[in-house]
Every structure is written in structure tokens, then in C-alpha cells.
Image (cartoon, grey):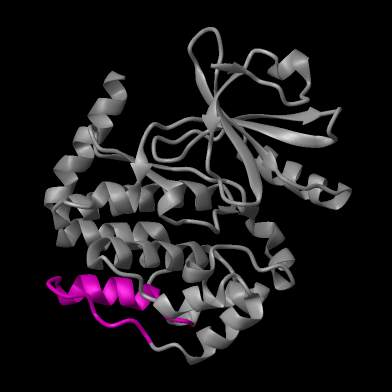
């Protein structure tokens, strides 16, 4: 274990010891840390800063701080590092695997169980006036022992009141980015953008393939991505699943938000629980485990 060597505000952060670097994408520095009481946290911050970005980042994190839900990683605090001139976030650490890797070998019912939990987390996020905007496998971790999901990775989260900022600054992972974000259609960006991302995740987990594979050719170039998106075809139906499940997933992948069949995560969740009643028992087991812990 290495004593943290970063130039931080010692009064707040001196007790944290680095365990390892934590992957939060190329735009963030993040470390899994432990203190003398054997508490684990993820400390993270953007890798570059300016005054305007710093103000927006703090506004975003302060909206997150203190929110608590069993399917969403908690942000405990945000501290300003005077030496380096930027904020540092202290977040919950969840010991799990990315959902795509974790779901390999699981039954369809177990996969739906994980996807329902993800919807529960999204519902909580949206009720608090936020969009996650980066719901991908690396940001949805699974504890395979408890079969429990936790949404992590708050780097792109934004208040629903600030979606106009996305008009000129598209945010997200290219292979999963909703059309309205890629093309800066800020007036129609709402919870359905996150539900599009959920549908990309669901298609990948259940079908073992990406719904929009040609997007990888853009290599992060937004103009190239937009051109591919203009020409791409709708994903093919998933094999060996019900028509209703295909209708939900493919419907939520529609390029036009107004044509997606659900506006809220709770709507999708309710239909999935009717289609897969076996999931209800699995969900109850997760809640009981949480109450006992």
C-alpha cells in the first residue's frame, strides 16, 4: 500500500491511502483508497480544469452529494484542493464486475433481474432531477454473490435544468450515445436519453452484441459519428426472446425520443416484472440482503 502522494488538502484527504488506480475513463483521474479504519472510497477529479468547468463540476457534484439508494453509488463529499485548484470527489466503492462481463453465463431471468435493478437506480437518479448520461457496462457494476447492481461513474452526470449545455458539448460514450445528444438537440433531452443508454446495455447483455457496431469506426470523432448515425440502420431483433421484450428494447433504441414507448424507467420496469414474474423473488432477496447488512 502506497501513501497518497498527490498534492491535496491534507486536512480532508491526508488519511487516504492509494490501493490502485480506478478506471473512470480517459477524462478523469480516480483512485481506490483506504483509510486506517479500513473504509474504502473512490477519490476522483477531472484531468483538466478551468474556472468555468470547475463551477459546473461543483454544481453537478453538490446535487449528487448525500443521495442514497441501494442501486446507486453514493457521493459522500466534494472538497476543493487549493494546491491544484480543483475539486476532488469522495465516492462509495462497490466491489463488483462490469455488468456485461458479470452477466456472461447468467440465465435470461437473471439478466432481466440486473436490468430491472438498473432501472430502479435510474428512476432514483431522475426523481432527483439528474441525468447520468454515461450508462455503460463499466459504469454498472454487479456483485455476483448477491446478484446486485450498483450504478457508478458520475463524471458526465448533469442536472436536467442544465441540458442546454449539451447543445454544443455532446457528452457520452460514442457507441451508445442517443441521437438527441449527438446532434445537440437540447430541447428534447430528458430521461429518455438515459433510457436509450439502458436499451443499448440491455441489447448487448441479452444478445451478446452491440446494437450499433459501425459507430466504433468513428474513433471518438463527433462529426464522423454523426455521419454514421445518419446512415445506420435500426438494430435487428434479438433472437430467442419474446416479441414483447424485443418491442421494449428496440422501441427504446428509436432515434426519435418521442417515438420511444416509455418516458420513465418505472414504466419499463413494471412491464418487465409482468413479463418475468420470477424476477420479483430475486428482487425481494436483494432487498432482504440489504436490510440484513
Residue 171's place in the image compared with 62, above or below, is below
The x, y position of residue 112, in whole percent, is 23, 55
Count the numbered circles shown: 0
Instruction: Name the image quarter holding residue 180.
Output: bottom right
The magenta segment is 234-255
The x, y position of residue 26, in whole percent, is 61, 52
Looking at the rendered image, the quarter that the C terminus falls into is: top left
Relative to 131, is 14 on the left or the right? right
The x, y position of residue 162, in whole percent, is 71, 59
Q: Which residue is found at the position 31% from the left and 65% from the top?
A: 204
Residue 195's place in the image compared with 213, above or below, is above
Is residue 95 inside the magenta stretch?
no
Instruction: Name the image quarter holding residue 273.
Output: bottom left
Relative to 39, is 118 on the left or the right? left
Q: Which residue is found at the position 83% from the left and 33% from the top?
A: 84
Relative to 180, is 293 on the left or the right? left
User: Furthest residue to the top?
Assistant: 36
In this rendered view, identify the residue nearer to me: 207 or 22: 22
In this rendered view, identify the residue nearer to me: 27 or 135: 27
Looking at the image, can residue 192 be seen? yes
Looking at the image, can residue 261 be seen? no
In this rendered view, identify the residue nearer to me: 169 or 68: 169
Relative to 141, is 292 on the left or the right? left
Amino acid at each position: 500500500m502506497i501513501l497518497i502522494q498527490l498534492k491535496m488538502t491534507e486536512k480532508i484527504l491526508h488519511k487516504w491511502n492509494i490501493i490502485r488506480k480506478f478506471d473512470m475513463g480517459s477524462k478523469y483521474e480516480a483512485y481506490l483508497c483506504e483509510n486506517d479504519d479500513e473504509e474504502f472510497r473512490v477519490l476522483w477529479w477531472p484531468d483538466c480544469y478551468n474556472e468555468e468547468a470547475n463551477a459546473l463540476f461543483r454544481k453537478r457534484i453538490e446535487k449528487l452529494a448525500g443521495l442514497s439508494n441501494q442501486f446507486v453509488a453514493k457521493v459522500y463529499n466534494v472538497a476543493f484542493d487549493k494546491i491544484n485548484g480543483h475539486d476532488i470527489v469522495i465516492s462509495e466503492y462497490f466491489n463488483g464486475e462490469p455488468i456485461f462481463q458479470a452477466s456472461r453465463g447468467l440465465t435470461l431471468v437473471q439478466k432481466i433481474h440486473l436490468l430491472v435493478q438498473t432501472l430502479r437506480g435510474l428512476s432514483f437518479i431522475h426523481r432527483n432531477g439528474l441525468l447520468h448520461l454515461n450508462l455503460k457496462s463499466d459504469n454498472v457494476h454487479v456483485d455476483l454473490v448477491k446478484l446486485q447492481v450498483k450504478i457508478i461513474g458520475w463524471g458526465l452526470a448533469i442536472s436536467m435544468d442544465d441540458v442546454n449545455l449539451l447543445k454544443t458539448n455532446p457528452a457520452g460514450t460514442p457507441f451508445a450515445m442517443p441521437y438527441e445528444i449527438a446532434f445537440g438537440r437540447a430541447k428534447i433531452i430528458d430521461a429518455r436519453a438515459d433510457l436509450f443508454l439502458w436499451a443499448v446495455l440491455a441489447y448487448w447483455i441479452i444478445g451478446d452484441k452491440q446494437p450499433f457496431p459501425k459507430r466504433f469506426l468513428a474513433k471518438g470523432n463527433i462529426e464522423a459519428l454523426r455521419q454514421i448515425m445518419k446512415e445506420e440502420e435500426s438494430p435487428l431483433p434479438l433472437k430467442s426472446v419474446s416479441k414483447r421484450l424485443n418491442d421494449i428494447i428496440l422501441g427504446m433504441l428509436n432515434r426519435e425520443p418521442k417515438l420511444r414507448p416509455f418516458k420513465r424507467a418505472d414504466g419499463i420496469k413494471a412491464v418487465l416484472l409482468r413479463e418475468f414474474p420470477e424476477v420479483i423473488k430475486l428482487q425481494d432477496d436483494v432487498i432482504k440482503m440489504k436490510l440484513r447488512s
